[in-house]
Every structure is written in structure tokens, then in C-alpha cells.
Amino acid sequence: MTLLRALVTRKPIGAVGAAIVLVLLVVAVFADRLAPQHFNETSLTDALQPPSRAHWFGTDELGRDLYSRILYGAQVSMTVGLAATAVAVLLGAAIGIVSGYFGRGVDLALQRVVDAWLAFPGLVMVIALLVLLGPGLGSVILALGISQAFPQSRIIRGATLVVREHAYIEASRASGASHGRVLLRHVLPNVVAPIIVSASTYVSFVILIEAAVSFLGYGVPPPRPSWGGMLSATGRSYMVRAPWLSVFPGLALTLAIFAFNVLGDALRDLLDPRLRAA
């Protein structure tokens, strides 16, 4: 409650981002009830209709209601963004905390694996994982989560290195506490704030990467709509004849990325002790 109050009073733009994120989550959960039509309901007589009272965002080349498809696309973007970020945070936290806490040989071995992974472009690694895992929503979540876990681990490792040098860590070791107890009781609670900040920032990046792989044809297979897939399939083909097919999915994608970015920046300012003191 204190964090929410500080977000509203001290970071109003972040509060706006949080409100937009909340709306997107509600839309994603209740898209079946909010959408006037099913995402794959076709009507060739209504193909490529411009925005009107019957179809707020117009229709695509098969006569499907674009407004309904964008609402259903929010399900894909929110599910992929949140679930893939959760996978990245869990895997990245495990790598970063173990690497930073134990140091020496363990740290050296894990960081060389991280360096080797980061040597390749992120989008190339995502596409390679999707080729191995096959098409589907679960494959997209797993591929994006794994690819983002290694950059996450660097942030968490840095926070762990700072926490490891505190006196209470040495006191816990001297009292006979096991490594597992020290990690769970002392290290993990003190790196939660950096984890939350990095996770809130990475959600927007994951949504953008999902849109990119969907645009390239490696994302969630049709007919299930995703914002990136809508930009690639019909938006690019009918960009001049029916510009609403690319404008509205692009605006939805921009709004989601903006909301998560400003929310992540606000949480960083509120949770980072150095910035909070300043």
C-alpha cells in the first residue's frame, strides 16, 4: 500500500502506466466477453471495411473484426510478456545468485556460459530456440524466457555481490548457517527489489521481441491473433489500401510497451535506495 501511494503521489506518469497495464490485463483476461466477435469469425462481404460504427477498427481481408482481434491479441502479448519474464527471472535469479554468492570457480564457470550466450544476437537465439521447440504459445514463452534469463542474471549477480559483503552474511556463516539458509533468508530478500525492477522493465522488451518473431513468422501460429502477426500478415500486405490494419495493432503494441516502460522506470526510482535517497 505504501508503494502504491508513493507511485501515485511521486510518480504520476508511472501511475498512468500502471493503470494502462491493469486495463490491458483486464482485457486479456476477459477478451472473450469484451470482444463483439470471435477472433476468427469471417464475413467476406465485409472484407477490408474501414472503421465504422459496426466495426470500430475496421475489418481485414477475410472480414474479421479488427477490434476483436486486437482484444484477443492482448491475451497473447500479456501471457507471453508476463510468463516469459517469470521464466527469465526465475532462471536468471538462480544463475545470478549462485554465481555472485559462491564466487571463484562457480562464478567463473557460470559467467563464461553467460558470456558465450550473450555473444550471439538475442533475436537470432530466440529464433533458433523456436526452431528447436516448434510452433506454439508455450514454445514462444520458453524461448523468450530462456533468452532473457542470461541478461537478467548479470543484474542479479551484481546485486548479490553487494549483499554478500555485508556483515550479517558473515555473521550467519560464522553461526553455522548452511549456504541454502543464507541464500534463502538473507541474500534473496535483499535482491528482490532489483529483481522486481528488472522484471518490470523486461516485460515490455519481451512483448516487443514476441511481436518481432511473430512478424517474422516464428511466433504464435495463425489463426490465433498476435499484434506482431497482424502487422506481418495483413498489415504489411494491405498497408496502402487498408492502413487501419497496421495502424491499430501498432498503436496497441506501442501503448503496451510505453505502459510497462514508464511503470518500470517509476518502480526503479522508488525501490532503488540510491535513487530514493537522491
Image (cartoon, helix red, strand yellow):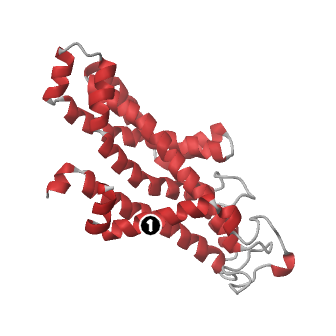
Quarter of the image containing the C terminus? bottom left
Asked whether, in this view, residue 269 is left or right of residue 33, the answer is left
Q: Is residue 124 visible?
A: no
Q: In the current view of this chain or complex, which residue is farthest to the front? A: 1
Q: Would you call the spot at circle 1 few (<14 residues within 10 Å), some (14-19), or many (20 or more)?
A: some
- Name which quarter of the figure residue 128 lies in: top right
Look at 37% across and 61% down and name the residue there: 263
Above or below residue 149? Residue 48 is below
Relative to the observer, which residue lies in front, 211 or 57?
57
Above or below residue 131? Residue 218 is below
Per the image, the residue denoted by label 1 is: 19
Relative to the observer, which residue lies in front, 204 or 114?
204
Q: Is residue 254 visible?
A: yes
Q: Position of residue 39 (x, y in %)?
A: 74, 65
Look at 37% across and 35% down and name the residue there: 115
Amino acid type at image mark 1:
Ala
Asked whether, in this view, residue 169 is left or right of residue 59, the answer is left
Q: Position of residue 157 (x, y in %)?
A: 30, 35
- Name which quarter of the figure residue 8 lies in: bottom left
Give the structural element (helix, strand or loop) at label 1.
helix
Above or below residue 83? Residue 265 is below
- Name which quarter of the figure residue 165 lies in: top left
Above or below residue 225? Residue 57 is below
Quarter of the image containing the N terminus? bottom left
Q: Position of residue 28 (x, y in %)?
A: 60, 60
Look at 19% across and 56% down and name the residue there: 276
Relative to the observer, which residue lies in front, 120 or 224?
224
Q: Position of residue 98 (x, y in %)?
A: 34, 26
Q: In the current view of this chain or complex, which residue is farthest to the top? A: 176
> How many numbered dots are placed on residues in this image?
1
